[in-house]
């Protein structure tokens, strides 16, 4: 691993590095990493247009199946900008609380668009007009994990109120498919705000109970093809109490 840049901000400990091996793949990869060691974004320097990581491939599949003709999307959490980069002709607003993450995405990962709003993602989402969005994507991580106020019923209700048509919300989390009260609570909140939900899990490594969890919700059943989900498997979340804003 060759470290290119390392910075500490109020929200993140950021490392940019290059490596010849990534999750069993060989090549030449440039990665964005936060303090927990998780890779937040990666590009293949030999094929920069390729989507390297599984979870953005799965998100792109869900977006393509459930909102194929979307015109306006709002994304909380920028990373290196993998998902907006796949839709140069669509209108994406990307909320990123850490201005250095946005700058690093441009300097080291070639993100070309001027569509990043710096600030709290939920506050920026709530400033959007009602019935103005086709999709909302939440992929926000700090050194403490996904901010709690992005996983509550009130946040999801705010997102639903800003969607037109059936709408689609996709939320990327880390956790477990079983025995994870936080995942159960977030899903319970999502199910109160939207008519239909779906959940998908990809273990961090084979046989492990911990990994990536994708939650999707909208006004109609969530469509997907197993072969398009980049290894994510559907699961039924356990019952839980809906996550709420703290008074």
Image: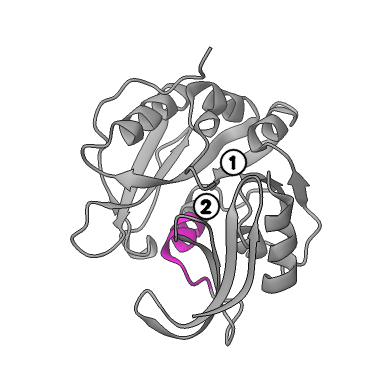
In this view, the residue farthest toward the right is: 114
Identify the secondary structure beneath mark 1: strand
Q: In this view, does 155 lie above or below 29?
A: above
In this view, the residue farthest toward the left is: 207
Whole-percent x, y for residue 49 in the image: 60, 76
The residue lying toward the viewer, choosing from 189 and 219, is 189
Stretch in magenta: 51-61
Q: In this view, does 233 lie above or below 144?
A: below
> Measuring 49% from the left and 41% from the top, which residue is drawn there?
146
The residue lying toward the viewer, choosing from 92 and 219, is 92
Residue assigned mark 2 = 63
Disc with the residue nearer the chain's start (2 vs 1): 2
Residue assigned mark 1 = 136
Which label lies toward us, 2 or 1?
Answer: 1
In the rendered structure, the answer to whether residue 160 lies left or right of residue 97 reads: left
* Badge count: 2
Whole-percent x, y for residue 99 in the image: 74, 51
């Amino acid at each position: 691993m060759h470290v290119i840049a390392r910075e500490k901000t109020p929200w993140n400990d950021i490392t940019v590095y290059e490596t010849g091996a990534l999750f069993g793949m060989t090549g030449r990869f440039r990665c964005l990493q936060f303090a927990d060691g998780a890779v937040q974004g990666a590009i293949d320097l030999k094929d920069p247009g390729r989507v390297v990581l599984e979870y953005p491939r799965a998100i792109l599949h869900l977006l393509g199946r459930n909102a194929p003709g979307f015109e306006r999307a709002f994304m909380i959490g920028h990373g290196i900008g993998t998902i907006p980069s796949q839709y140069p002709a669509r209108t994406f607003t990307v909320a990123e609380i850490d201005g250095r993450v946005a700058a690093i995405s441009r300097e080291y990962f070639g993100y070309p668009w001027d569509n990043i709003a710096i600030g709290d993602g939920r506050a920026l989402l709530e400033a959007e007009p009602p019935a103005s969005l086709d999709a909302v994507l939440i992929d926000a991580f700090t050194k403490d994990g996904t901010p709690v106020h992005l996983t509550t019923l009130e946040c999801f209700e705010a997102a639903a109120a800003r969607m037109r048509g059936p709408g689609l919300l996709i939320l990327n989390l880390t956790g477990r498919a079983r025995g994870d009260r936080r995942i159960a609570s977030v899903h319970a909140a999502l199910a109160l705000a939207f008519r239909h939900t779906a959940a998908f899990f990809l273990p961090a490594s084979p046989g492990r109970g911990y990994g990536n969890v994708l939650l999707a919700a909208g006004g109609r059943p969530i469509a997907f093809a197993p072969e398009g989900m980049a290894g994510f498997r559907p699961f039924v979340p356990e019952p839980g109490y809906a996550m709420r804003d703290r008074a």
